[in-house]
Amino acid sequence: MKSLRLCVEDPIFDGYRIDKYIALNIKLFSRSQIKTRISKVFLNGELTKISKRVKLGDYIEINYTDPPSIDLIPENININILFENQSVIVINKKQGMVVHPGSGNFSGTLVNALLYYCKKLNESFDAELMRPGIVHRLDKDTSGVLIVAKDIQTLEFLSKQFRKKTVKKTYLAIVKGKPPAQTGKIETGIIRDPLHRKRFKCSLSKGRKAITFYKIIKEWDNYTYLLLKPYTGRTHQLRVHMRYLDCPIIGDKLYSSKNKEFSYPLMLHAFKLAITLPGQNQLKEFEAPIPERFKKIIKNIKNIMINDLETKAPR
């Protein structure tokens, strides 16, 4: 049995449940592990339930057990590095790569590749962690910019920016259909779909708040090339919001009907990420070039020539 003591120092967590605070504030547990690995919780010295809400200045002590031992094997897998310094690695994640081990994927992930490439990850993070250095995630079939921390201090520094929503994220997508306006804001709740355990859906009355801004870059008949800017970071948010607009992302087999257009790979790309790095006081922007699959599919849509796609990325 191990113990850990924490102090609620960031005002953003005032009023949070203990389990949510632990999941967001430290990377020792996943949300699903909290109930199984934590045996006792003390709030300001008194035994309490994990559902208790915390206040600024509270002290939390947790007694927990180690997870089953799973060895993460470093693997020599090619990764596309956009930027690297002593604190971070910024990667253009390829489509089809899982970010971290889990749910039966214990090899071939980005984490396996990073452990081979960067020995500092082994030195800086506990071997028990399944997501060493992972600040945020992209779905397996989403490509683009992803930032990784090389040490625990950097991990917390970057994670705090995601929690406070000061990070600026820009995605590119090609969808079937047309949004109702040239620019717009989608604001809904997102809940798990009760009829499909792997899917989420929009709700106007419940769920976690999700906000996405969009802008039309180019239109062809019944297809649209979009720039998407998520303000929040809910699971599958962009895919769910596009379905909500009746504009499913091409290649999205989970959130679209089985039309021939969706035999293509997922047309969603994390194009830009702007974030403040340790030791700096202003946002630094990283950009992953438009993938070749975007250019190929545009060429195939209604026989539109490749020159119709703006070769210079939208700003």
Image (cartoon, rainbow, N blue to C red):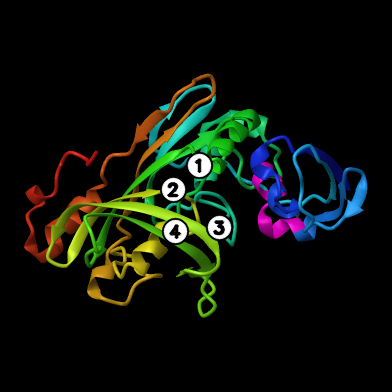
The span from disc 3 to disc 1 (Cα, nearest Å) is 30 Å
Q: Position of residue 165 (x, y in %)?
A: 50, 42
Q: Position of residue 242 (x, y in %)?
A: 34, 63
For label 2, count other residues whose C-alpha is less than 10 Å away and answer few (under 14), some (14-19) or many (20+): some
Left or right: where 46 falls relative to 247: right
The span from disc 4 to disc 1 (Cα, nearest Å) is 15 Å
Left or right: where 5 falls relative to 92: right
Quarter occupied by residue 245:
bottom left
Q: Position of residue 120 (x, y in %)?
A: 60, 28
N-term-proximal mark, 2 vs 1: 1
Tell me the mark number nearer the camera, choosing from 4 and 2.
2
Front residue (pair 304, 77): 304
N-term-proximal mark, 3 vs 1: 3
Q: Which amino acid lies under the numbered mark 1 shown in the image of this protein? A: Lys
Tell me the mark number nearer the camera, choosing from 4 and 1.
1
Q: Which amino acid lies under the numbered mark 4 shown in the image of this protein? A: Gln
Dominant secondary structure of the residues highlighted in magenta in the image: helix
Q: Which mark is residue 237?
A: 4
| Relative to 254, residue 161 above or below | above
Left or right: where 243 falls relative to 296: right
Badges 2 and 1: C-beta atoms under 8 Å apart? yes
Residue 280 in sight in this render: yes
Extreme-right residue of the structure? 46
The span from disc 2 to disc 3 (Cα, nearest Å) is 29 Å
The region drawn magenta spans 22-34
Tell me the mark number nearer the camera, choosing from 2 and 3.
2
> Residue tagged by mark 2?
231
> Residue tagged by mark 3?
105
Residue 75 in sight in this render: no
Tell me the mark number nearer the camera, choosing from 3 and 4.
4
